[in-house]
Image (cartoon, rainbow, N blue to C red):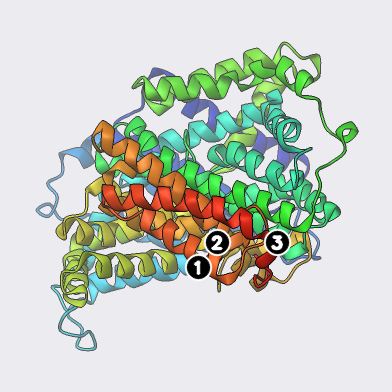
Amino acid sequence: MRRLEGIVKKGFYLYVLAMGLFHLYTAVFGSFEAYLQRAIHLTWVLPMCFILYSFKPHKKGDPFETSVPWYDWLFALLSTLPGLYIILSYDEIMMRMQGVDDLTTLQLVLGTMLIVLLLEATRRIVGLPIVIVAVAFTAYTYFADAPFFPDMLRGVPTEFSRLIEGMYLTDEGIFSSSLGVSATFVMIFLIFGGFLEKSGVGEYFMEFAQAFTGKAPGGPAKIAVLSSALFGSISGSAVANVYGTGSFTIPLMKRIGYKPFFAGAVEAVASTGGQIMPPVMGAGAFVMAALLGVQFNTIMIAAILPALMYYGTVLLMVHLTALRDGLQGLPADELPSIRSVMKKLYMMSPIVLLVYMLLAGYTPMYGAIAGITLAWAVSLINPANRMGPREILQAIHDGSENIPLIATACASAGLVIGSVALSGIGFKFVGAVITLSRGIPFIALILIAIVSLILGMGLPTTSAYILGAALGVPALAKIGIMPLAAHLFVFYYAIISNITPPVALAAYAAASIAGANPNRTGFAACRLGILAFIVPFAFCYDPGLLLKSSLLGNLTSIISGTTALTALGFAMAGYAKGRLSSFYRLAFGMLGLLALYNNRTVSLAAAAATLGLFLISGRNKGKTGGGTGKV
């Protein structure tokens, strides 16, 4: 990012602030019609991309640019023209008959200009991979009958004018529902995050985690897990979460004896899981609610048990590792006391209110507005965090300034969504998956998991999920997987690509802080997050893991989930009541997998066997030296 100075900095501050105030206004008093709201949103965001971000990415050690070159001012100006045309000609555009009325020369030029400038803005902010994917899908739509395509992928090409029409003048391309989520929910929750930061609530999350886990064995690791779960759900970015909390927790973990690669892995796994932890779950969950056509609380409730299992496993493994290696917690005099933290428990009230409103069926917009208001109110209690007019405006600005990444990624993903709709390649992908899997659900799930992981390695989570859902969910629905489970399956694998080598962005970010080998950190993170690779398969077969079964079925799934996280934690850490031999580790691992088997008798039997094996393992502490004890 550029570091603007002087009058340009002041003018840009007012520009971003005005954008934030506009979105707050529409959140309170109602948004414009979908296509118009999205056009206004993108028109406001695109100039920011060229003013804030250089043509060449900034390299570590290089001085930051402080001025905007003339060509970027030109790009910023040109990027407003397509949106301004939509705003000024909205009624005329709405009266058009798609596929019947011809495009004017002006519409053709503006639509082409928007696609080119959007791709360049995305390249600067998000990176080249998503641009390559968007260009490939868009080009396929135009060259669908090219002889170099195999027969299975060959289709009917779309005329250039109809391609521009679909991408620019409808809500099925660039201005699809994915950009709509950025223009409404994501924007408001970014501002909400700005208020949490300025009001001291974000800092309180860390104090809360320190007070309750800091003195326990492996305390800093538990601080990392708990604080990242609290902070990550709001931030929605694994890498941002790593830098936000890891700069504090990773040095503490190293200080008490955790190896650098393991300290980095703990933070990477904890930060990545924030996107699957209700109540917010980043931007992707809002897109999911829009695509499924359900209330957001449906997504939130379904995600809660898998998220708790994920974090339960990570907490158990860092606890067992600390016991195994004799790692103590932090001294009490370095930590806030539980009493002092409990006195400020009211700081949690914005999050509690948000959860209540979402569960009660209010829209995420109203929930976020209520949370923003309460965050401001609680700031008034503590003079150090009291938010006056200046701090309120700064919180709106700071939150709004983070929107270009999400907005450009969602708009570019809209190019893929539009291409799928225009070309019909989605149907071909469904056919290919069913053919390759021979209709066997498990094989189809593996294929979609691989696609989602590959997409997630090069794209932000939201973009990877949108593309994976556009291609993979119809295939999973065709073989009988529940739509909600299919969407969550793709969502999970798009997220855990952040800790999956060879391109594990969250793990690499944590490794840079820890001073550890990136690949070793990534593989350690995979082992810590093992349940995230297994549970998506399980909830596609067992709706109880998403709390979508009968009462008995849900209770059985809770028992099986608890058994799985416990048994797999013992197996991966190599420690229960003492160090475990290879035999015990293998036995616990098998029982953990059996607990997730979609059969009530098998699940409950695995739970009983896990308890029995745990009790027996304690009698063999002196005979279990065969285990390596490595995580």
Q: CA distance from mark 2 to mark 1?
A: 7 Å
The local secondary structure at tag 2 comes to helix
Residue 296's x, y, as percent? 35, 33
Residue 543 appears left or right of 25: left
Badge 2 or badge 1: first in the primary sequence: 2
Q: CA distance from mark 3 to mark 1?
A: 22 Å
Q: Which residue is mark 1?
A: 586
Residue 284 appears left or right of 580: left
Asked if disc 2 and disc 1 are in contact, CB closer than 8 Å, the reply is yes
Residue 31's x, y, as percent? 36, 27
Badge 3 or badge 1: first in the primary sequence: 3
- Quadrant housing residue 360: top left
Question: Which of 385 and 149 lies nearest the eye of the viewer?
Answer: 385
Residue 45's x, y, as percent? 50, 44
Residue 163's x, y, as percent? 24, 62
Question: Which of 615 and 543 lies nearest the eye of the viewer?
Answer: 615
Residue at image position (48%, 69%) is 129
Q: Which residue is mark 3?
A: 262
Say few, some or many: other residues with alpha carbon within 10 Å of mark 3 (under 14 / 14 to 19 / 20 or more): many
Q: Which residue is mark 2?
A: 571
